Image: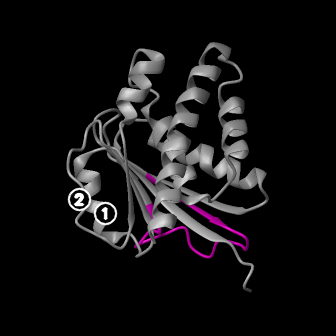
């Protein structure tokens, strides 16, 4: 059982920030790598602006339960989500923080915190913040190495296959996020 792989992440924020899409892309990339996957969305009754989150579980064996009361990792896109999920992350986990909208940091020292200006990166590349979720997705993949960058980029290219003009800008945003996450992981490994 020592070669068992297990990882999980919660994506949380406002509805309309693309969190469910980011989670689906991670799940699809995990399936492409031969992992067992659970993707569980949760959202309020509002279409945009309400709360939204999803949990993705990746495992080398069948996922026993998709319910994760204490996730290994979290991506938080707004302050209420950070306040809710940062205390719940398992020690040694990763917290990706959309620092475009969240100035605060968790006071925890037993997790890796990766602040990333998701909205700013998306605005710089696309002219709007609609693809901020791709920066966050790249950051969690880079910070955790839970799947390969190639798998997540392929899932993204497949998602936008019918909208070719959106492919390269979203790939650029994803890649920038991945580099920030990977740099944070490497720095933590050197310091640790």
Q: Which residues are magenta?
A: 54-73
- Mark 1 neighbour class, 10 Å CA radius: few under 14, some 14 to 19, many 20 or more: many
The residue positioned 47% from the left and 28% from the top of the image is: 131
Judge from the rendering whether residue 37 lies leftward or rightward of residue 129; answer left or right. Answer: right
User: Whole-percent x and y of residue 52?
Assistant: 37, 46
Judge from the rendering whether residue 72 lies leftward or rightward of residue 104; answer left or right. Answer: right
Q: In this picture, is 28 found above or below 163?
A: below
Query: Picture quarter containing residue 57?
Result: bottom right
Work out whether residue 55 can be spotted: no
The residue positioned 48% from the left and 19% from the top of the image is: 125
Query: Picture quarter containing residue 98?
Result: top left
Tell me the number on the disc at residue 83.
Answer: 2
User: Whole-percent x and y of residue 97?
Assistant: 35, 49
Element class at badge 2: helix
> Residue 40 colored magenta?
no
The colouring scheme, among rainbow, by chain, secondary structure or one colour, is: one colour
- Mark 2 neighbour class, 10 Å CA radius: few under 14, some 14 to 19, many 20 or more: some
User: Whole-percent x and y of residue 115?
Assistant: 35, 47
Q: In this picture, is 191 found above or below 158?
A: below
User: Principal SS element in the magenta part?
Assistant: loop
Whether the residues at callouts 1 and 2 have beta carbons within 8 Å, the answer is yes
The residue positioned 67% from the left and 45% from the top of the image is: 149
- Marks counted in the figure total 2
Q: In this picture, is 161 found above or below 105?
A: above
Q: Nearer the viewer, residue 86 or 68?
A: 86
> Which residue corresponds to mark 1?
86
Element class at badge 1: helix
In the image, farthest residue toward the bottom: 1
In the image, farthest residue toward the front: 190
């Amino acid at each position: 059982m020592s070669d068992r792989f297990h990882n999980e992440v919660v994506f949380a924020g406002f509805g309309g920030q693309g969190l469910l899409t980011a989670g689906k892309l991670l799940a699809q990339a995990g399936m492409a790598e031969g992992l067992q996957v659970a993707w569980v969305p949760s959202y309020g009754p509002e279409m945009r602006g309400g709360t939204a989150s999803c949990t993705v579980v990746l495992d080398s064996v069948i996922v026993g339960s998709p319910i994760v009361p204490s996730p290994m990792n979290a991506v938080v896109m707004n302050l209420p989500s950070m306040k809710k999920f940062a205390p719940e992350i398992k020690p040694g986990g990763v917290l990706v923080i959309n620092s475009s909208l969240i100035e605060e940091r968790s006071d925890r020292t037993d997790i890796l915190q990766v602040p990333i200006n998701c909205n700013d990166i998306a605005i710089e590349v696309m002219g709007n913040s609609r693809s901020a979720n791709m920066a966050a997705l790249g950051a969690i993949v880079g910070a955790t190495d839970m799947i390969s960058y190639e798998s997540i980029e392929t899932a993204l290219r497949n998602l936008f296959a019918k909208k070719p003009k959106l492919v390269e800008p979203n790939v650029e945003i994803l890649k920038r996020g991945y580099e920030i996450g990977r740099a944070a992981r490497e720095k933590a490994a050197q310091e640790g």
